[in-house]
Image (cartoon, rainbow, N blue to C red):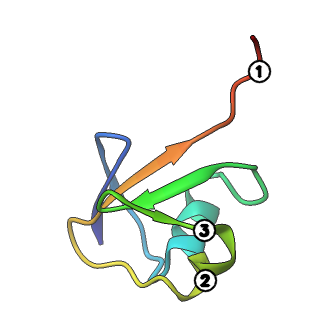
Amino acid sequence: MKIIVNGESAEVEAATLAGALEELGYGEALVATALNREFVPAPLRGETRLSENDRIEIIAPMQGG
Protein backbone atom coordinates (compact mmCIF):
# COMPACT_ATOMS: atom_id res chain seq x y z
CA MET A 1 0.00 0.00 0.00
CA LYS A 2 1.06 3.57 -0.56
CA ILE A 3 1.89 5.63 2.55
CA ILE A 4 3.75 8.86 3.24
CA VAL A 5 6.81 8.59 5.50
CA ASN A 6 8.36 11.83 6.71
CA GLY A 7 6.87 13.60 3.71
CA GLU A 8 8.06 11.04 1.14
CA SER A 9 5.95 8.47 -0.71
CA ALA A 10 6.64 4.83 0.19
CA GLU A 11 5.15 1.42 -0.61
CA VAL A 12 4.79 -1.19 2.11
CA GLU A 13 3.11 -4.58 2.40
CA ALA A 14 2.66 -4.29 6.17
CA ALA A 15 -0.76 -3.87 7.72
CA THR A 16 0.50 -2.38 10.98
CA LEU A 17 2.78 0.46 12.00
CA ALA A 18 5.22 -2.01 13.57
CA GLY A 19 5.38 -3.99 10.34
CA ALA A 20 5.94 -0.86 8.28
CA LEU A 21 8.80 0.23 10.55
CA GLU A 22 10.38 -3.20 10.10
CA GLU A 23 10.01 -3.01 6.29
CA LEU A 24 11.46 0.50 6.23
CA GLY A 25 14.57 -0.57 8.13
CA TYR A 26 13.69 0.83 11.56
CA GLY A 27 13.22 -2.60 13.19
CA GLU A 28 14.70 -2.18 16.68
CA ALA A 29 15.62 1.50 16.34
CA LEU A 30 14.66 3.80 19.20
CA VAL A 31 12.34 6.22 17.46
CA ALA A 32 9.16 8.15 18.16
CA THR A 33 6.27 7.65 15.77
CA ALA A 34 3.12 9.48 14.77
CA LEU A 35 0.35 8.29 12.48
CA ASN A 36 -1.66 11.04 10.84
CA ARG A 37 -0.29 13.52 13.41
CA GLU A 38 -1.25 11.37 16.41
CA PHE A 39 1.58 10.08 18.62
CA VAL A 40 1.75 6.27 18.73
CA PRO A 41 3.61 4.79 21.72
CA ALA A 42 5.95 1.89 20.93
CA PRO A 43 3.79 -0.74 22.73
CA LEU A 44 0.81 0.12 20.49
CA ARG A 45 2.57 -0.03 17.12
CA GLY A 46 1.81 -3.73 16.60
CA GLU A 47 -1.93 -3.15 16.87
CA THR A 48 -2.01 0.18 15.01
CA ARG A 49 -3.49 -0.59 11.58
CA LEU A 50 -2.41 1.26 8.46
CA SER A 51 -4.59 2.45 5.60
CA GLU A 52 -3.79 3.66 2.10
CA ASN A 53 -2.26 7.19 2.11
CA ASP A 54 -1.63 7.26 5.87
CA ARG A 55 1.06 9.71 6.97
CA ILE A 56 3.77 8.36 9.26
CA GLU A 57 6.34 10.54 10.98
CA ILE A 58 9.45 8.82 12.35
CA ILE A 59 11.65 10.87 14.65
CA ALA A 60 15.00 9.71 15.98
CA PRO A 61 16.36 11.20 19.22
CA MET A 62 19.20 13.69 18.84
CA GLN A 63 22.07 14.19 21.22
CA GLY A 64 23.48 17.51 22.13
CA GLY A 65 22.80 20.37 24.40
In the image, taking residue 19 as reference, residue 10 lies left or right, namely left
Q: Quadrant of the N terminus?
A: bottom left
Cβ atoms at labels 2 and 1 below 8 Å apart: no
Look at the numbered disc 1 and give the secondary structure of its residue: loop
- Mark 3–mark 2 Cα distance, whole angstroms, equals 10 Å
Q: Nearer the viewer, mark 2 or mark 1?
A: 1
Labels 3 and 2: the sequence-earlier one: 3
> Residue 54, percent across and down?
27, 66
> Residue 51, percent across and down?
28, 79
- Mark 3–mark 1 Cα distance, whole angstroms, equals 21 Å
Residue type at mark 3 is: Pro
> Residue 9, percent across and down?
27, 48
Mark 3: give few (<14), some (14-19) or many (20+) Cα within 10 Å.
Answer: few
Cβ atoms at labels 3 and 1 below 8 Å apart: no
**Residue sticking out furthest to the front:** 65
Q: What residue is disc 3 on?
A: 41
Q: Quadrant of the C terminus?
A: top right
* Placement of 10 over or under 59, stated as above or below: below
Q: Which labelled disc corresponds to residue 46?
A: 2
Labels 3 and 1: the sequence-earlier one: 3
Q: What residue is disc 1 on?
A: 63
**Residue drawn at the location 41% of the way across and 84% of the way down:** 49
In the image, taking residue 29 as reference, residue 19 lies left or right, namely left
Residue type at mark 1 is: Gln
Labels 2 and 1: the sequence-earlier one: 2
Quadrant of residue 41 within the rendered picture: bottom right
Quadrant of residue 63 within the rendered picture: top right
**Residue drawn at the location 32% of the way across and 57% of the way down:** 37
Look at the numbered disc 2 and give the secondary structure of its residue: helix
